Image (cartoon, rainbow, N blue to C red):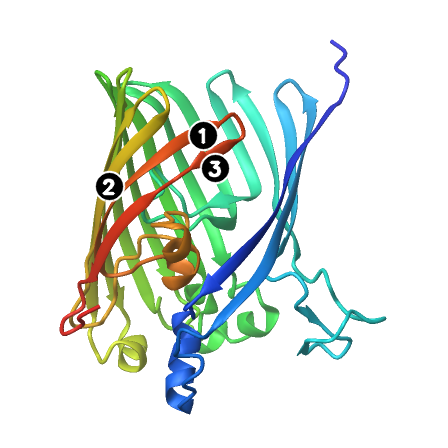
């Protein structure tokens, strides 16, 4: 049977401007305090900037059972801030040799092959770091091999994936040390994940188990510097007017003696957990919502459960104040509404409160 190649292009383009008054990121504030810079600590600190995000998706359908997917993106966090020809940041106008687009990246490049109507294998650079709700998620790009099976027993779908984040054992220089008893294969960074999706009446459940070995912190060819056992259970449900979602997650950490000595004061283990719930009411002109979230703190090591970069507690906290992982080790809650003012305009008022769970921290 003949089959013609099908090519599909989709994408998005976002350009936005922001104005900040009496605002400074925590990382900059620490430096301002250390330097005694009273201006940066005062309410006189005001500025405006622009950022841009561009993304193009390309899907090439090779056969009815096979396709290749690629995504290219460019993100300018601050338009006008660029690298000069020497590689340093400058404030001058762009000149010949300047690098304005050093943030162009290939985010996805993978092949998908259906082995049967219910079994699919995918391999390559894919999305990872996200599951169930946005709570605890920090989606990024990972090299993975994934096997997915639909309609298996009580599950709508199940899957297994092998994720490779750091490869040390295949380096010829490292391999040459194997006869002497130093095996750098133990310094790889691997992740094994088993997940499922199932329904219990009107409720959809998202269980996941993961095991990670992180060995490249100290390249000693001895043992994994850190292993992590993780469990996540997410749940969602909805009626005509009411929707809700919830998630609980637990992480158990184990450290090698060498790594613990330099990173966690000799502690050989730690654990963190997070809890989240959100309920919303769909009205004619608005969606009214309330959520609460909790991220624990391990007192012995200082490890904190992170709400995740994808969570976005609010427009400011999710993007800047909490850093790249939003809030960490905190208790938070919010009331907000998505109000449809007109077809192309939505207004979102929000009231939020959060407090730190770190001992002796009054934030």
Residue of label 3: 146
Question: What label does residue 254 carry, if any?
Answer: none
Distance from disc 3 to disc 1, alpha carbons, whole Å, reads 43 Å
Mark 2 crowdedness (10 Å alpha carbons): few <14, some 14-19, many ≥20: some
Closer to us: 204 or 18:
18
The residue drawn where x is 32% and y is 65% is 226
Q: Foreground mark, 1 or 2?
A: 1
SS assignment at label 3: strand
**Residue placed farthest to the top in the image?**
1
Q: Foreground mark, 2 or 3?
A: 2
Query: Where residue 362 appears, x then y in whole percent?
Result: 17, 70
Q: Is residue 159 visible?
A: yes
For the N terminus, give its image quadrant.
top right
* Residue 266 shown left or right of residue 184 in the figure: left
- Give residue 319's quadrant in the image: bottom left
For the C terminus, give its image quadrant.
bottom left
Q: Earlier in the sequence, mark 1 or mark 2?
A: 2
Residue of label 1: 341
Mark 3 crowdedness (10 Å alpha carbons): few <14, some 14-19, many ≥20: some
Question: What label does residue 291 carry, if any?
Answer: 2
Query: Where residue 208 appears, x then y in whole percent?
Result: 30, 39
SS assignment at label 1: strand
Distance from disc 1 to disc 2, alpha carbons, whole Å, reads 23 Å
């Amino acid at each position: 049977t003949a089959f013609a190649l099908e090519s599909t292009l989709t994408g998005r383009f976002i350009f936005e401007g922001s104005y900040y008054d009496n605002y400074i990121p925590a990382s900059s504030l620490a430096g301002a305090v250390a330097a005694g810079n009273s201006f940066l600590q005062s309410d006189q600190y005001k500025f405006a900037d622009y950022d841009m995000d561009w993304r193009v998706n390309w899907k090439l359908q090779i056969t009815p059972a096979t396709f290749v997917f690629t995504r290219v993106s460019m993100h300018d966090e601050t338009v006008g801030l660029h690298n000069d020809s020497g590689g340093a940041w400058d404030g001058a106008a762009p000149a010949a040799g300047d690098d304005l687009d050093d943030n162009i990246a290939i985010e996805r490049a993978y092949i998908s092959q259906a082995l049967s109507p219910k079994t699919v294998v995918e391999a390559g650079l894919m999305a990872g770091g996200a599951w169930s709700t946005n709570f605890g998620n920090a989606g990024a790009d990972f090299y993975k091999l994934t096997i997915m099976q639909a309609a298996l027993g009580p599950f709508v779908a199940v899957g297994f994936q092998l994720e490779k984040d750091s490869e040390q054992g295949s380096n010829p220089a490292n391999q040459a040390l194997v006869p002497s008893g130093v095996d750098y294969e133990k310094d790889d960074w691997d992740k094994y994940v088993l997940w499922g999706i199932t329904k219990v009446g009107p409720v959809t459940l998202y269980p996941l188990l993961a095991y990670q070995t992180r060995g490249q912190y100290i390249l000693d060819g001895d043992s994994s510097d850190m292993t992590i056992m993780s469990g996540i259970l997410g749940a969602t449900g909805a009626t005509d007017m009411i929707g809700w979602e919830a998630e609980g997650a637990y992480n158990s950490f184990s450290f090698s003696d060498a790594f613990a000595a330099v990173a966690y004061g000799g502690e050989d283990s730690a654990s963190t957990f997070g809890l989240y719930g959100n309920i919303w009411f769909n009205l004619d002109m608005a969606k009214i919502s309330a959520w609460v979230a909790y991220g624990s703190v391990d007192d012995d090591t200082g490890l904190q459960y992170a709400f995740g970069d994808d969570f976005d507690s609010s427009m400011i906290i999710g993007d800047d104040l909490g850093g790249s992982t939003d809030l960490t080790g905190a208790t938070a809650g919010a009331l907000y509404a998505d109000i449809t003012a007109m077809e192309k305009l939505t207004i979102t008022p929000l009231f939020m409160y959060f407090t730190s769970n770190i001992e002796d921290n009054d934030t």
